[in-house]
Amino acid sequence: MKTPLLIILTICLLNETFERNIHERWSVELKKYVGKDGLVDYENWNKNTEGLDAYISVLKKNHPKDYWSKNEKMSYWINAYNSLTIKIILENYPVSSIRKIKNVWGEKILFFEHRSYSLDEIEHDILRKMKEPRIHFAINCASISCPKLSKDAYLSYKLEKQLEDATVSFIVNKNEINTNEIKISKLFFWFKKDFGSNENLLNFINKYSPIEIKNPKIKYLAYNWDLNIIQ
């Protein structure tokens, strides 16, 4: 009876080690160039992109496999989206906004042997189809109003806590919440389908907000697309 359990535990440990090895370099880069508030030191990162390029090269060599768990796939694609976004900004730096870059979300930028992906495809065709609305607070679009960029790579074995932390941070810091009125990010409007009805949305916000809301008026904040750069 112990042998099958031992095999399962061994496989889990090997998977965790493999995943850490894939994404370790991304964590190193994030810690060097991302501040506690999620703003990014693009100027200095642009002077040394070797680590970022090496990480993206590792991503290309380790396309998610069918036998990977949902969390392993989700972590991979969140990290891919964020690192590729940084890569695009640095390739066009200095730039005042990601929206100044032509076809930034539609251009193919991640290439495997038989498939290539754009940022739009990673977000809409892969991550959103995993039916996990909290991914919207983990992926970063290099803008002031976006969820902040994490200083750590996302990893499957701690993904639940990472998504919870990212969601709390976004709800608290990127929205204006009062009992009878809330002014919330346009992310909730653009991705309304992922959060469901107004009732479901309010329940979602209530779960993470320190202020309890009860049938409030809903308004949407203007979205600031300025680059999330450390000044």
Image (cartoon, rainbow, N blue to C red):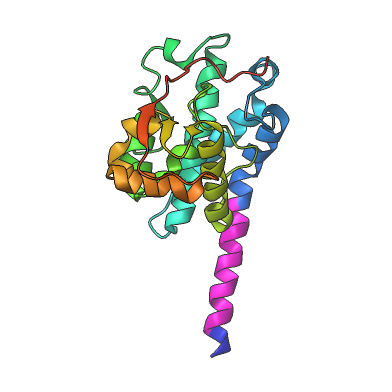
Instruction: Give the x, y percent position of residue 157.
Output: 57, 58
Is 119 displayed left or right of 37 in the figure?
A: left
Residue in the picture at 35% in, 43% down:
215
Up-down relation of residue 112 to residue 8 (above or below):
above
Residue most extreme to the front? 180
In the rendered image, residue 14 lying in the magenta stretch gets the answer yes
Camera-side residue of 48 and 105: 105
Instruction: Give the x, y percent position of residue 228.
Output: 57, 20
- Magenta: main secondary structure equals helix
> What residue span does the magenta drawing correspond to?
4-19
Choose top left, top right, bottom left or bottom right for residue 135: top left
Is 31 displayed left or right of 112 in the figure?
A: right
Residue 179 shows in this picture? yes
Point out the image quarter for the C terminus: top right
Residue in the picture at 69% in, 27% down:
33
Instruction: Give the x, y percent position of residue 90.
Output: 57, 17
Camera-side residue of 32 and 1: 32
In the rendered image, residue 87 lying in the magenta stretch gets the answer no
